[in-house]
Image (spheres, rainbow, N blue to C red):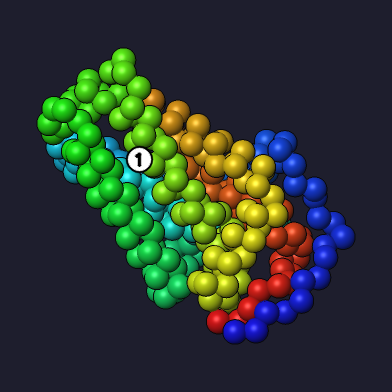
Amino acid sequence: MNAHPTTPNSHAVPVTLASPARWLALGWGDLRRNPSPGLLHGLLLACFGWLLLWAARDKFWLLAGAFSGFLIVAPILATGLYHVSRSCSSGACVGMGEVVSLWRSGDRRLVAFGLLLGLAGTGWVLTSAGLITLWSSVPIEKPADFLRHVVLVRELGLFEAWLLLGALLAAPVYASTVVALPMLVDRPVGVMVAVQASWTAVANHPGPAVAWALVIALLVGLSMLTALIGLIVILPLIAHASWHVYCDLTQRDTHGLLQGAGQP
């Protein structure tokens, strides 16, 4: 798998701590220009989230596992929207037919990546369950138990350790996907090449990358507070904005001539 030398993009926009606002604005522009695919993605995933809430409403670990897996795999389910944003950048407007065709192609790279993310989600659920089971002095069986005995307790310890552990496990997953997923849609590169490019991009722009991760967490949190209704708009907004994150972090030019990627 040979890599080509990187060709600088003279039109590249500097990546700064203010870049997340620009990415959101560009993502919003893509959503406004071609709203149907994005809103349909958001509605379907919101409905899936409501189904999870109903099925696991009294089963804490099933609910936590389902939602952890849902949030980790959601970027894979939104990959069709990267194709929509790529088309918008060239002045084209694609419909759900082309997005469905992307999925029907059965791209093994996206399937493999989805499986890896699923394994990561499973690992987090098991680790989380083990931490709370071993640390908590009372059984945690329902969501109300977790809220009462973990989140709302006055003593510092378990909840803070749970959040820190989640952040430590989420960080490498985020670093592996923030550039890799759009790149897999955009370029015929292998999974490991895309992951390596993602880690390199994050290492080169740590501040903006962390800021973008915090923006995503905030937007997802807002969608949770709206009983997932906000996810209908927030999910496509994040997906479209993520395409522009990829373009800026890799200095992809406006004609899609990204250099520095290997062939699968």
**Image quarter hosting the C terminus:** bottom right
Residue shown at 53% from the left, 49% from the top: 239
Relative image position of residue 135 (x, y in whole percent): 22, 34
In this rendering, position of residue 155 left or right of residue 237: left
Q: Is residue 148 above or below residue 111?
A: above
Q: Secondary structure at mark 1?
A: helix
The percent coordinates of residue 157 (x first, y second) are: 33, 27
In this view, the residue in front, 159 or 98, is 159
Residue 53 lies, with reference to residue 112, above or below; the image says above
Relative depth, front residue between 238 and 189: 189
Residue 202 horizontal side relative to residue 55, left or right = right
* Towards the viewer: 233 or 58: 58
Q: Residues within 10 Å of mark 1 (few under 14, many from 20)?
A: many
Residue shown at the point (19%, 43%) measured from the top left: 62
- Quarter of the image that includes the N terminus: bottom right
The relative height of residue 157 versus residue 73 in the rendered view (above or below) is above
The residue located at (72%, 36%) in the rendering is 18
**Residue identifier under label 1:** 46
- State left or right for residue 154 relative to residue 201: left
Q: Is residue 199 left or right of residue 108?
A: right
From the top left corner, tell me how far across and down residue 198 is, in percent.
Answer: 59, 60
